[in-house]
Image (tube, rainbow, N blue to C red):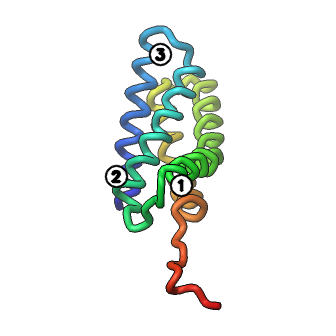
Amino acid sequence: WKFGVVGTVGATLNLCILWSLVTIGITEAAAWAIAIEATITSNYILNTLLTFRDRPFINKLHFFRRLGKFNAASGVAIAINGGMVFILRQVEVPLIPAAFLAILVAMTINYVTVTRLVFQVQEQPSERRE
C-alpha cells in the first residue's frame, strides 16, 4: 500500500509539473521529460523513506547508486508512459488525462521492476551460508 501512496503523490506531482510547464509555454515533450525525472527522483526518496525503510541505504554512495538503479529500472515504465501519452495525444486525448492513464499503467510495471532490481531483500551477513 505504501508504494501506491508514493505513486499517488508522484502522479499528482507529475501532473502538476506537466500542466505548469505547458502553461508557461514549454513544449509538451520537454515538459513531460522534466515532470518524469522530477517524479522519479521524488518517488525514489519517498520509497526509500517510507515504502522500503526496512531496506535502508548504507552510506551516501549507496544512496546515489540506488538512485541510478531506480532511474534505470524506471526506464521500462518511462517508455510505456511516453508511448501511451504519444498515442493518446495522436487521437486527441487531452494531455493531462492522457498522462494520467499512462501513469496508471506504468506504475504497475514500475513496482515490479523497482522491487526486484532496486530494493531487493539482501541477506544479512549473519544469514549467509558458507
Judging by the rendered image, the residue that carries numbered circle 3 is: 22
- Tell me, for residue 62, which label it has, or none: 1
Q: Disc 1 vs disc 2: Cβ atoms closer than 8 Å?
A: no
Mark 3–mark 1 Cα distance, whole angstroms, equals 35 Å
Q: Quadrant of residue 50?
A: bottom left
Residue 112 percent coordinates (x, y): 56, 61
Counting every numbered tag in the picture gives: 3
Of the pair 105 and 92, the residue shown nearer to us: 105
* Residue 106 seen in render: no
Of the pair 3 and 87, the residue shown nearer to us: 3
Residue 25 percent coordinates (x, y): 49, 8
Front: mark 1 or 2 = 1
Q: Secondary structure at mark 2?
A: helix
Identify the residue at image location x=42%, y=13%: 23
Q: What amino acid type should be assigned to the residue bearing mark 1?
A: His
Identify the residue at image location x=52%, y=26%: 34
Looking at the image, is mark 3 or mark 1 earlier in the sequence?
3
Judging by the rendered image, the residue that carries numbered circle 2 is: 5
Mark 2–mark 3 Cα distance, whole angstroms, equals 26 Å
Identify the residue at image location x=47%, y=16%: 22
Q: Disc 2 vs disc 3: Cβ atoms closer than 8 Å?
A: no
Mark 1–mark 2 Cα distance, whole angstroms, equals 24 Å
Q: Quadrant of residue 75?
A: top right
Q: What amino acid type should be assigned to the residue bearing mark 2?
A: Val
Residue 5 percent coordinates (x, y): 34, 52
